[in-house]
Amino acid sequence: METVRQQIVAKFTELLGEGQFVYGSFKSKPHTPYGNYALDYTNNYFADNRTYCKIGTYIYRLVTDQKDFELEAKIEDMFDELEIPYQTITDEDINTQKVHCTEWAVTLVGRQ
């Protein structure tokens, strides 16, 4: 059974292309558009010496040459289709790299 996180990764890979979406960071800078994601923090629920419920917040990042409304809408539609609440936390040009970066915080509860 595919986890929600695996479904998100598959959809990002479908939208951006093979090798354009990774966990963590790239070994060398890819061509745009590209993206990555990483675990930001956990807030698991513990009791009786065990983890009852896993709660992980991940940051999903999209980097494009310029703001891409259409691609961002497809990503947010994907979150909606998977019934995943999200929050846009970054939506800005990075002038030093001449790219646009959009980031979403996504909290996954349960099997991740």
Image: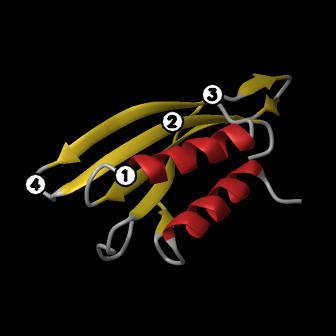
Q: Earlier in the sequence, mark 2 or mark 3?
A: 3
Give the label, 1 or 4, closer to the camera: 1
Q: Earlier in the sequence, mark 4 or mark 2?
A: 4
Secondary-structure class at tag 3 = loop
Depth check, front residue: 26 or 35 = 35
Crowding around mark 3 (Cα neighbors within 10 Å: few <14, some 14 to 19, many 20+) is few
Q: Separation of disc 4 and disc 2 at Cα?
A: 24 Å
Q: Amino acid at mark 3?
A: Asn
Depth check, front residue: 30 or 109 = 30
Q: How is the image coloured?
A: secondary structure
Q: Separation of disc 3 and disc 4 at Cα?
A: 34 Å
Q: Earlier in the sequence, mark 3 or mark 1?
A: 3
The answer to whether residue 49 is above or below residue 24 is above
Relative placement, left or right, of 30 versus 74 is: left
Crowding around mark 2 (Cα neighbors within 10 Å: few <14, some 14 to 19, many 20+) is some
Secondary-structure class at tag 1 = loop
Marks 2,3: beta carbons within 8 A: no
Give the label, 3 or 1, closer to the camera: 1
Q: Separation of disc 3 and disc 1 at Cα?
A: 32 Å
Residue positioned 82% across, 29% down in the render? 49
Q: Separation of disc 2 and disc 3 at Cα?
A: 14 Å
Q: Look at mark 2 in the image and give the residue it sits on.
A: 105
Q: Look at mark 4 in the image and give the residue it sits on.
A: 96
Indicate the position of residue 1 as horizontal and vertical percent values. Answer: 89, 59
Indicate the position of residue 11 as horizontal and vertical percent values. Answer: 64, 60
Q: Look at mark 1 in the image and give the residue it sits on.
A: 68
Give the label, 2 or 3, closer to the camera: 2
Indicate the position of residue 69 as horizontal and vertical percent values. Answer: 40, 46
Q: Earlier in the sequence, mark 1 or mark 4?
A: 1
Mark carried by residue 43: 3
Q: Amino acid at mark 1?
A: Asp
